[in-house]
Image (cartoon, grey):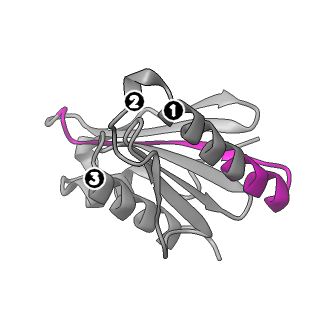
Amino acid sequence: MVASCAGFTAAAGAEFLGVPPADVKDSSIATGDYSRECRFASTTEPKKKVGFQLIFSDTVEAAIADMAQSRDNYKLAYRTPARQGAEVPFEEIAGVGDEAFWTAINGFVVMRRGNLTFTFTYPYQDKKGQIELARKVVAGMPK
């Protein structure tokens, strides 16, 4: 069961957002036995929020396979008529977790660290902001 947001807290969210810790609400919820939606938002500045989905896999190998499947899914989605002429479906990101990529299809950073897979959704469609958030989450995780 995923019990927390991989060590990411409301205080870390406040630091990332540049607001006082008392100003951040943690509305994270378990979405299944092996998944969690982590959400942190300013109570006074509603546009300031961070969020990510966290999925726990039984093994590192299973998480690696899930990342490969995600890449394949984005490649398929890119081939649809609605996406013709769009950006490349994903871009690998070095130095973030064990592996990570940005997907232009939905504007998310997807990252794996060990047997945990993260999909960063906020700041929304902000590649740079999501990469910074991913780095902050990894930096706060136990080694």
Residue ID for mark 3: 21
Q: Please tell me which residue is depicted at 28% across the width and 61% down the height of the picture.
A: 15
* Count of picture labels: 3
What is the spatial separation of the Cα atoms under label 2 and label 1, in whole angstroms? 7 Å
Query: Tag 2, which secondary structure?
Result: helix
Contact between labelled residues 1 and 2, with CB atoms less than 8 Å apart: yes
Residue 119 in the image: x percent, y percent? Answer: 52, 45
- Three-letter amino acid code at disc 3? Pro
Of 82 and 3, nearer the camera is 82
From this view, report whether residue 90 is shown above or below residue 112.
above
Image location (x, y in percent) of residue 58: 85, 50
Residue located 46% across and 66% down the image: 93
**Nearer to me, 109 or 89:** 89
- Name which of mark 2 and mark 3 comes first in the sequence: 3
Q: Quadrant of the N terminus?
A: top right
Amino acid on which the number 1 mark rests in the picture: Arg
Instruction: Name the residue furthest left.
Output: 45
Label 3 element class: helix
Residue lying at the far top in this picture: please name it.
Answer: 82
Q: Which residue is more in the foreground, 81 or 8?
A: 81
Of 59 and 64, the residue lying toward us: 64
Quickly name the residue at label 2.
83
Tell me where the magenta segment starts and ends, as one range: 46-67
The residue that disc 1 covers is 79
